[in-house]
């Protein structure tokens, strides 16, 4: 292998730049070339490439977003698009790819590997933490800290006005962000897709909270939770049934994807980036690198996509006990 391509695809995540930097510098260390592919798979199809030297990735370890840009490419889902991508890769002389992203990114990589027998290694980068084969995805820790910081602020105003706040957080179909940030921010209740609390139990719990003398409350709702149709309808329902509460809603949205990565995410990205390059140089393919019990380990891309990363239900119990 003489030339490795690196791309970021799907939703961006803080720490993706640190991962790009690690891949580029590991390539420089092992004296092979590294090509940055812009806009994920779309850039692969369009041949949007730039040769990256170690100095091209100076001063990006601390930056949010991704210098390579990201996209959710529809064209790459079609065989025609992938064929075009393969031609561009051949033209550029790229021998292998490092794919930084989530399950959509890895699915694309698997199909591509199947069709063209092209070496691919995945690095998990998504704030959702919903990937099997790693305890943590790059960006998750930063997003948690962002959410906790914002909920701390919401708590100030909730407490001044004696209000109940529903705070919706990201995570797609997974409750990792809601559960961990909820515990970290001291939320009264945490609603996640993995556990159906039920509307009645939610009302009961909020009534109990009021009776116990609390004047303000925060309920963290994962965007994938199905208890209400959406967080606004849920808030309306609670206000109708519990007139003693004045309710407000805050949807945190894309701010959760931005900002400078935490030290944890930078270190994780650096470790996984180096390992991805080393695996390719070892002739390995179709694997994802991840962190399991603080060791860098590999998982088949297929398992990473199809396997289920379970939330830690122990945290729900802790949250219940804390909201006495
Ligand atoms: O996968 C990351 C994520 O931020 C999810 O939490 C969220 O559901 C989704 O991406 C939002 O996607 P988009 O930025 O395309 O609206």
Image (tube, grey):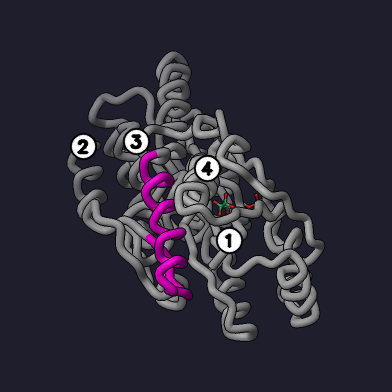
The answer to whether the residue bearing label 3 lies less than 8 angstroms from the nearest atom of ligand 1 is no
- Regarding mark 1 in the picture, which secondary structure is present there? strand
Which residue is denoted by mark 4 in the rendering?
Answer: 21
Name which of mark 4 and mark 3 comes first in the sequence: 4
Vertical relation: 39 (above or below) 145:
below
Few, some or many residues within 10 Å of mark 4 (<14, 14–19, 20+): many
Between label 1 and label 2, give the one nearer the viewer.
1
The residue sitting at 35% across, 47% down in the picture is: 179
Between label 1 and label 3, give the one nearer the viewer.
1
| Residue 316 percent location from the top left of the image | 26, 50
- Regarding mark 4 in the picture, which secondary structure is present there? helix
Name which of mark 1 and mark 2 comes first in the sequence: 1
Is residue 8 something one can see in this rendering? Answer: no
Looking at the rendered structure, which numbered label has been put on residue 322? Answer: 2
Q: Are marks 4 and 2 in contact (CB under 8 Å)?
A: no
Vertical relation: 239 (above or below) 298:
above
Which residue is denoted by mark 1 in the rendering?
Answer: 4
């Amino acid at each position: 292998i003489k030339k490795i391509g690196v791309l970021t695809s799907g939703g961006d995540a803080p720490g993706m730049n640190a991962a790009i930097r690690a891949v580029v510098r590991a390539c420089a260390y092992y004296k092979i070339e590294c090509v940055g592919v812009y806009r994920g798979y779309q850039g692969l199809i369009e041949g949007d490439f730039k040769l990256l030297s170690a100095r091209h990735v100076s001063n990006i370890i601390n930056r949010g977003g991704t210098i390579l840009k990201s996209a959710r490419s529809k064209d790459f889902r079609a065989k025609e698009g992938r064929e075009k991508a393969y031609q561009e890769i051949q033209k550029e002389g790229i021998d292998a790819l490092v794919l930084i992203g989530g399950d959509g990114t890895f699915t694309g990589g698997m199909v591509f590997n199947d069709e063209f027998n092209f070496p691919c290694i995945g690095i998990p980068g998504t704030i959702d933490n919903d990937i099997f084969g790693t305890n943590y995805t790059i960006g998750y820790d930063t997003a948690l800290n962002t959410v906790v910081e914002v909920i701390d602020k919401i708590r100030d105003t909730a407490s001044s006005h004696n209000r109940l706040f529903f705070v919706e957080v990201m995570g797609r179909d997974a409750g990792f962000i809601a559960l961990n940030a909820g515990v970290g921010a001291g939320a009264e209740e945490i609603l996640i897709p993995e556990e159906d609390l039920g509307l009645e139990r939610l009302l009961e719990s909020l009534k109990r909270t009021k009776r116990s003398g609390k004047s303000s409350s925060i309920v963290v709702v994962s965007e994938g939770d199905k208890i209400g149709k959406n967080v606004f309808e849920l808030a309306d329902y609670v206000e109708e049934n519990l007139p003693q509460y004045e309710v407000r809603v805050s949807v945190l949205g894309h701010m959760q994807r931005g900002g400078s990565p935490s030290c944890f995410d930078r270190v994780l990205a650096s470790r996984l980036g180096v390992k991805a390059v080393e695996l390719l140089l070892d002739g390995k393919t179709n694997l994802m690198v991840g962190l399991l019990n603080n060791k860098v380990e590999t998982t088949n891309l297929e398992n990473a996509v199809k396997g289920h990363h379970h939330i830690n239900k122990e945290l729900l119990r802790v949250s219940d006990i804390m909201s006495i």
